[in-house]
């Protein structure tokens, strides 16, 4: 009886969701293939563990970067293409601050604020890393958050607020303009060459042949704390509740007496702050910074957000981590230069199987 | 001395004018019904009072204060609450969270109001941690009313509270409204279920094409031959 039930349920699934079944079969096959390769010794456990760890690092970067994007989407209903360049802006603001604090007295203020640039300041001479100069990094993180929040507010006031009643596509195109403006403004100030940021001996731990970099750990821990903070804000504070209420039903939020414009402002402040932190931390982990950092990352961040369910803040976190880990795990089969392909294949599969994302119908909450 | 006084109100959406010279009075603790054919602008009157339409002229005075053209978030703090017709709960939020949002404008959360709402709608207390989206239609309607009662308003605006409810729940809904009104809250009600609404209210207004047509006690309107033929199906 039970076997027949399973059989008919399977048959239904095959008829109704053939795409899902195909991808599920492929997924199961891949899991068995990993086990087989482990068994035959084609890959070793150490490699697998380091894929997972590096995947987690990438995933937390994408997740943290995605939270702000998802927030603006859920409250304002548009895909903010300027988000990538907000990430970059935060990174530059934070790192200018970190350089200034770490190198004040040794180098000219101008050179430090421009993070080297035309005037050479070797990152090795400054020796910024999490052990040598924790205060400079902390200050950088705070400034990155604050400046990106202020920048977001300013952009909202100048560009998005006058267009509040416009539809999502119009706002999205406006945001592309904002993205170009920000990137070119940064290029004007900082030029396009890549900057080395960290220096000195960055501590790292090796456990069972898997290397955990100090800055990787910093990123994962700080990102996790910030996500936890966002969770507490959303679930247990009045304003967080209002943000969830507004994401769910704007018209009702208005008649309930929720000051919607104030919630919008706060969304930009919180979302911007988290985005700035993401930019600063990603640059810290990479050790380098260019003006296209955020833009290059944006498609992956979008993929993470779509994976989790557009507009869902928890979805962005989970989507980021899944995408990060899955794309690194793909290194079992494909060379590292195809990492982006793996990430986007996952996104496409997700859109085919469950277009509304993992956390669909659970907007924000 | 009337609580709400609407004089010669012109209002609509954007460039589209719906209401022309609408007059309406709601006294303290009074129960008023607006009836009329579809598209008469019944809901528009209510939304205009609450600042949700484009104000085009006339007077809206609530509690001696001119509220025409003000924002809902300000109007609600004067003692007016509005329950929209549909989508009137925050579905992903729990029942308690929905009710807390109802008191958003207050600095201090009124625990005793929450208890008062739970006493009025005991089902909400048993479902307090449940997501509002998982409630039945009738329960959602109670939650929407409960949310509007969190500020203990002097006037409650109800936009078609019986819409979409099963027939046996409609009577219960009207009983609830009676209870709320008996407790001293004035009610301004828009209803499709015109006969029942007129039977229960103190006074009624008949609105046609965005203009006042009749105004009388509910009883009188029910018995008015013209009103019966035009809107109540004989």
Image (tube, rainbow, N blue to C red):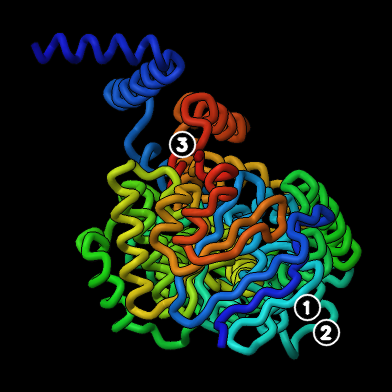
Answer left or right for B48 relative to B16: left
- As measured in the structure, the alpha-carbon distance from the residue carrying label 1 to the one carrying label 3 is 38 Å
The label on residue A108 is 2
Residue at horizontal 54 percent and vertical 49 percent from the top: B225
Q: Are marks 2 and 3 on the same chain?
A: yes
- The local secondary structure at tag 1 comes to helix
Q: Which residue is mark 1?
A: A112
> On the image, which quarter does residue B168 sit in?
top left
Relative to the observer, which residue lies in front, A14 or B206? B206
Q: Residues within 10 Å of mark 2 (few under 14, many from 20)?
A: some
In primary-sequence order, the first of circles 2 and 3 is 2
Disc 1 + disc 2, Cβ < 8 Å = yes
Residue positioned 42% across, 74% down in the render: A237
User: From where the camera sits, is residue B162 visible?
Assistant: yes
Please report contact status of discs 2 and 3: CB closer than 8 Å, yes or no.
no
Residue at screen point 71% across, 55% down: B210
Vertical relation: B212 (above or below) A356: below
Q: Pick the quarter of the image with the C terminus of chain A.
A: bottom left
Q: Is residue B68 left or right of residue B124?
A: right
Residue A127 at what x, y percent from top left? Answer: 63, 74
Q: CA distance from mark 2 to mark 3?
A: 45 Å
Residue beneath label 3, please? A326
Q: Nearer the viewer, residue A249 or A181?
A: A249
Residue placed most toward the observer, A157 or A37 = A157
The x and y percentages for residue A221 are 43, 65
Circle on res. A257: none
> From where the camera sits, is residue A277 visible?
no
Chain name for mark 2: A
């Amino acid at each position: 009886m039970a076997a027949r039930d399973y059989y008919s349920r399977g048959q239904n699934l095959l008829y109704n969701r053939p795409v899902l079944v195909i991808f599920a079969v492929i997924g199961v096959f891949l899991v068995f293939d990993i086990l087989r390769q482990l068994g035959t010794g084609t890959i070793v456990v150490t490699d697998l563990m380091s894929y997972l760890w590096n995947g987690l690092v990438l995933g937390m970067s994408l997740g943290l970067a995605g939270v702000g994007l998802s927030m603006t989407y859920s409250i304002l209903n548009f895909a903010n293409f300027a988000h990538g360049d907000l990430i970059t802006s935060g990174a530059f603001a934070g790192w200018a601050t970190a350089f200034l604090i770490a190198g004040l007295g040794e180098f000219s203020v101008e050179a430090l604020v421009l993070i080297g640039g035309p005037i050479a300041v070797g990152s090795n001479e400054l020796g910024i890393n999490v052990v040598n100069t924790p205060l400079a990094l902390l200050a950088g993180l705070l400034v990155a958050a604050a400046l990106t929040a202020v920048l977001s507010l300013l952009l909202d006031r100048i560009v998005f607020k006058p267009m509040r009643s416009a539809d999502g596509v119009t706002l999205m195109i406006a945001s592309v303009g904002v993205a170009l403006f920000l990137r070119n403004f940064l290029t004007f100030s900082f030029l396009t060459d890549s900057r080395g940021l960290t220096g000195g001996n960055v501590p790292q731990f090796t456990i069972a042949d898997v290397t955990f970099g100090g800055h990787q750990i910093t990123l994962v821990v700080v990102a996790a704390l910030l996500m936890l903070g966002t969770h507490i804000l959303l679930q247990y504070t009045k304003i967080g509740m209002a943000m969830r209420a507004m994401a769910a039903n704007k018209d009702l939020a208005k008649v309930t007496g929720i000051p919607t414009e104030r919630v919008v402002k706060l969304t930009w402040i919180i979302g911007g702050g988290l985005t700035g932190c993401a930019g600063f931390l990603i640059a810290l982990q990479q050790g380098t910074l260019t003006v296209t950092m955020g833009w290059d990352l944006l498609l992956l961040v979008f993929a993470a957000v779509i994976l989790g369910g557009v507009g869902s803040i928890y979805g962005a976190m989970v989507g980021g981590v899944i995408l990060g880990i899955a794309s690194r795990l793909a290194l079992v089969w494909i060379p590292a230069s195809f990492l982006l392909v793996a990430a986007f294949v996952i996104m496409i599969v997700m859109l085919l199987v469950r277009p509304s994302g993992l956390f669909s119908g659970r907007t924000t909450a | 001395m009337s609580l709400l006084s609407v004089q010669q109100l012109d209002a609509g959406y954007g460039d589209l004018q719906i209401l022309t010279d609408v007059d309406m009075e709601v006294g303290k603790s009074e129960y008023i019904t607006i009836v009329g054919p579809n598209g008469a602008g019944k809901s528009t009157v209510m939304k205009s009072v609450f600042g949700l339409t484009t104000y085009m002229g006339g007077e809206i005075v609530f509690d001696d204060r001119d509220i025409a053209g003000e924002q809902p978030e300000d109007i609600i703090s004067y003692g007016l609450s509005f329950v929209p017709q549909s989508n009137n709960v925050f579905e992903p939020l729990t029942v308690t969270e929905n009710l807390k949002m109802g008191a958003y404008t207050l600095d201090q959360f009124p625990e005793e109001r929450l208890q008062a709402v739970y006493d009025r709608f005991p089902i909400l207390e048993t479902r307090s941690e449940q997501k509002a989206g998982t409630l039945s239609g009738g329960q959602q309607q109670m939650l929407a009313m409960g949310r509007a009662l969190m500020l203990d308003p002097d006037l409650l605006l109800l936009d078609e509270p019986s819409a979409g409810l099963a027939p046996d729940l409609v009577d219960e809904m009207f009983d609830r409204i009676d209870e709320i009104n008996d407790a001293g809250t004035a009610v301004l009600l828009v209803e499709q279920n015109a006969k029942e609404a007129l039977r229960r209210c103190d006074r009624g207004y008949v609105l046609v094409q965005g203009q006042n047509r009749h105004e009388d006690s509910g009883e009188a309107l029910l018995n008015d031959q013209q009103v019966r033929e035009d809107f109540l199906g004989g």
